[in-house]
Amino acid sequence: MSNPLQLHDVTKNFGDNTVLSGITLSINPGETVAVMGPSGSGKSTLLHCMSGVLVPTHGKVDYGETCLSSLNDDSRSSLRLNHFGFVFQDGQLLPELTALDNVALPAMLTGVPRYEAHQHAFNLLRQLGLEKFTKRRPGKLSGGQAQRVAIARALVTEPGIIFADEPTGALDQTTGQEVMQMLTTLVKQSGSTLVVVTHDSNVANWLDRRVEIRDGIVHDDRLLRGVR
C-alpha cells in the first residue's frame, strides 16, 4: 500500500555546488508523476533524495509517517527493498540470472519463499508478454524485453512507489512507448505511485502530473490534460 511522499525544503549540496535548493513537494498515493528538466537541473538528484538513496543536506523527506532523512543507511536500504521499486535506463539486470530469477530475487530478499516468489515473478512476466522468455538471461533479450523484465522486478514486491530514471532512454521511440504503456498500466492496476525522471515529453504524456526542475528549484508543477 502506498503512502504520501513529502519533501520539505529539501536542499542538496555536493561540496560548494548546490544541486537542489529548498524544494517542497507532495506526491499523493497512486499518482503518476514525471520529473522533467534540462541536463544538470537536479532531477536525478531529486529522485535519489525522494527514494532515500541520498540524504538531503537540509530539509527532510517523509514517506507516510517515516522520515527517510533521519534513518541510517541500513534502515533506508531496508525501506527501499520492502517499499520501493526501481527501473533504470539500462535495466541493471543481473547478467548471470535468468529473467525469472532476476524478477524473483527482490521478493526472496524480503523473505518470500522461493516457489512463491517464482510464481509471482512468472505471473508478472506473463502479463508483460514474456512467458516464453523466462529462462533467458539478459544478454539474450532485446532492449525492450529487458526493460519489461526490469518493470516486473520493480513490481514483484508490490511496492508503494516505483521510481524510474529515464526508463526509455536506451530504447527507440516505438519500443519506448510500448514500455511506458505497460509500465503505467501495471502500476495503476497495482495502486502504486510512479515517479519517472525523463527528458522526453512523449514519456511524460503517459503520466498524470509534470514537475519541471530548473537550477535546482521547482519551475512548474501541473496536472496534464488528456492523460491516457
Image (cartoon, rainbow, N blue to C red):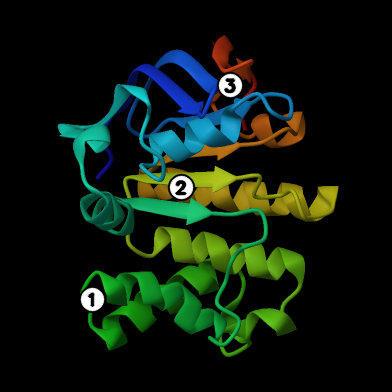
User: Mark 3 and mark 1: span between their CA atoms?
Assistant: 35 Å
List the single residue furthest toward the front. 16
Give the vertical position of 177 relative to 37 (above or below): below
Q: Which residue is mark 1?
A: 112
Specify the amino acid type for callout 1: Val
Residue 66 visible in the picture:
yes
**Marks 3,1: beta carbons within 8 A:** no
**Please, what is the three-letter code of the amino acid marked with disc 3?**
Arg
Element type where label 1 sits in the image: loop
Which of these two is toward me, 168 or 217? 217
Q: Is residue 163 left or right of residue 206?
A: left
Q: Are marks 2 and 3 in contact (CB under 8 Å)?
A: no
Q: Residues within 10 Å of mark 1 (few under 14, many from 20)?
A: some
**In the image, what residue type sits under mark 2?**
Val
Q: Residue at point 46% right, 73% down? A: 103
- Where residue 52 sits, quadrant-wise, is top left
Q: Position of residue 173 (x, y in %)?
A: 83, 47
